[in-house]
Image (cartoon, rainbow, N blue to C red):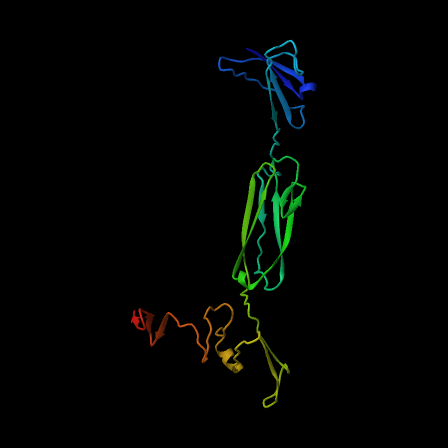
Amino acid sequence: MPVFLFEGEMWSSRWLQNLTSDSDGVANFSLSTANIEGDIHLQVSNTPTQGYPPYRTPYYESNDHTVSLATLSSPDTKTVSSLDVKKKDEPLSCDKEEDIFIQYTVVGEAQGFVDVMYLVSVNEGEVSFKLTVSPDMAPVVQVVAYAILPSETVIANSADFSTEQCFSHKVSLEFSLSSAVPGEETIMQVTAQPESLCGVSAVDQSVLIMEPGKTLDADKNVGMKMATNMDIREPSCLTYKGREYYQGYGDFCSIK
C-alpha cells in the first residue's frame, strides 16, 4: 500500500517521500542529513496530507519517531562516557584532609544535568572532594565514583589509595631539653589517652648505630611486647626453643 513520509511536528510537517510497503508491511527509505541540525522528527501516514484529522479519510492512520543525530568521532574527541578517579603517588596523610580528583567525560547524551557529587552542566571536566583519613581506613582506602546519566546509563570508576600506618591511640614523648650533658637532670613528659598503660625504655644511641633497621616502627608488623599483671588474650600458638606449640582441646597443647 502507499504510505507518505513527513518531517516535523504534526501541524507544521513537510513532505519528504512517497513510499510503498511490501507484502510484510515494510517500506524502506533513506534521506540525507547534511542540512539537518539537531534531532529529526519523522512521521508516516496513509494519507498524502498531514493535519489532524483528515476529515474525508475515515480510516486515517499515522505514526512518528524521533531520530537523534550521532556526533562523528575524531582522534581528539572521546567516544565513550567515562569517570576516572585520579590516583596519588604518595600515601594519604593521617588526620588530614586530602583532595581527591575525579575526571569525567560525557559523550552522546542529551543536554542536561549529570549528578556526580554535585550538579554538573558541562560535558567534560573535573570534580573534587575532601577526604579525612582516619585510623580505621589504614592501610588502604578505596574510593568509588559513579554517575547516572540522563539516558540511565551508569558510568563508574574506582581507585585504591594507600595510607600511612595510622593508629587510633596517640602517644607523644618530649624532653625539657633538646640535648644534655652526662649527669644533667632533665624532665621527660609522656602524653597518652586517659587510663593508658605506658612504659618507657632507654636505649643507648650506639646500639642503634651498630644495628640499624632493628627499631620498632609502624611497618614491621611484630605486634606488641608487654610485661603486665593484667589479664590479656592468650595466644593460639607459641614458639619455644625452635618448636611450635598449638592450642588443642581443653587445657592441652599439641606439638607440631
Residue drawn at point x = 64 percent, y = 51 percent: 128
Q: Residue at x 52, y 59 (%)?
A: 140
Q: Quadrant of residue 50?
A: top right
**Horizontal and vertical percent position of residue 131:** 61, 57
Q: Is residue 112 above or below residue 212?
A: above
Q: Residue furthest top?
A: 56
Q: With respect to residue 41, does 146 lie above or below?
A: below
Q: Quadrant of residue 156?
A: top right
Instruction: Left or right? Give the position of 256 relative to 35.
Output: left
Count the labels in the image: 0
The residue that appears at 64% across and 34% down in the rendered structure is 110
Q: Position of residue 162 (x, y in %)?
A: 54, 59
Q: Position of residue 27 (x, y in %)?
A: 54, 16
Is residue 190 visible in this depiction of the protein? yes
Residue 244: x %, y % from top left: 33, 71
242 displayed left or right of 181:
left
- Relative to 254, is 145 on the left or the right? right
**Visible in this render: residue 32?**
no
The quadrant the N terminus occupies is top right
Q: Quadrant of the C terminus?
A: bottom left
Q: Residue furthest right?
A: 12
Query: 164 or 15, which lies in front?
Result: 15
What residue is drawn where x is 61% and y is 30%? 70
Question: Against 254, is 77 above or below?
Answer: above
Question: On screen, 78 above or below 239?
Answer: above
Q: Residue furthest left?
A: 255
